[in-house]
Image (spheres, rainbow, N blue to C red):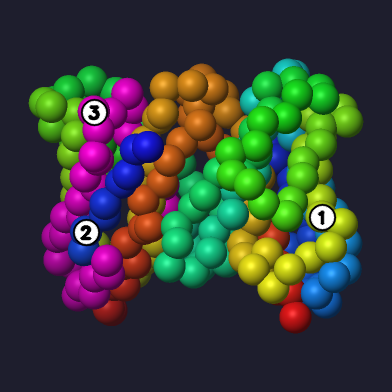
Amino acid sequence: SQELEQSPQSLIVQEGKNLTINCTSSKTLYGLYWYKQKYGEGLIFLMMLQKGGEEKSHEKITAKLDEKKQQSSLHITASQPSHAGIYLCGADTGANSKLTFGKGITLSVRP
Amino acid sequence: SQTIHQWPATLVQPVGSPLSLECTVEGTSNPNLYWYRQAAGRGLQLLFYSVGIGQISSEVPQNLSASRPQDRQFILSSKKLLLSDSGFYLCAWSFKEKLFFGSGTQLSVL
């Protein structure tokens, strides 16, 4: 079965700083999804990457999928308190949009 | 636009009691529907998914069951809850290869 490893497990940054978090798959990815979750709430879709080398940006968040389609990074520029939360990556298993998720990375942004 | 509703938001149940969590989707027809559970330190685990009325696939053996009595309704049930059933339960639906999640139900079994 496909496993996703997210690193670091948690991260505390000062407001205004840039940061990068990672997601590594044990198998080649059909598709890689990034979600954000506030504690005790549902997951909010951020971005989906499907092609090797693909890069997408939304506001101050940029996600990349490597050429081999086994690793993705999420970069936040000039972090703000609103960026705080749990970031989860999900991998498309190739059938019926069933996603396998990593354990998530908890991001805290200090004002 | 499409929306997904999930209730209740929180639930505290004694061991051995039954469970029923409901999820409905609006603004779409024949969606794929999913139940996930999020437990501390274990990430998000797919429990059930459904591609249509009465069609349920179970991903892991467990004390829970799912049903889809109507096109846009997905129900998670148990006849007798166990302590290990505690967790955060999320319903989701898929659209254009993306999953969209409900707001979740925090279940505590005591």
Q: Residue at x 67, y 52 (%)?
A: B62
Does residue B103 appear anywhere in the picture?
no
Of residues A81 and A6, the one drawn nearer to the viewer in this rendering: A6
Kindly identify which chain the residue marked by label 1 belongs to: B
What's drawn in magenta, residue-wise? A9-36
Quadrant in which the C terminus of chain B appears? bottom right
Q: Is residue B45 above or below residue B32?
A: below
On residue A7, which mark appears? 2
Q: Do the residues labelled 3 and 1 touch (CB within 8 Å)?
A: no
Does residue A67 appear anywhere in the picture?
yes
SS of the residue under disc 2:
strand
Residue A59 is covered by the magenta coloring: no
Query: Is residue B48 toward the left or the right of residue B23 in the image?
Result: left
Q: What residue type is labelled 3?
A: Thr
Residue B24, position in %: x, y?
Answer: 78, 39
On residue B78, which mark appears? 1
Seen from this angle, which residue lies furthest front? B61
SS of the residue under disc 1:
strand
The main secondary structure of the magenta stretch is strand
Question: Label 3 belongs to which residue?
Answer: A28
Kindly identify which chain the residue marked by label 2 belongs to: A
- Nearest to N terminus: mark 3 or mark 2: 2
Q: What residue type is labelled 1?
A: Ser
Of residues A53 and A111, the one drawn nearer to the viewer in this rendering: A53
Q: Is residue B74 above or below residue A43?
A: above
Q: Residue at x 13, y 32 (%)?
A: A66
Q: Are marks 1 and 2 in contact (CB under 8 Å)?
A: no
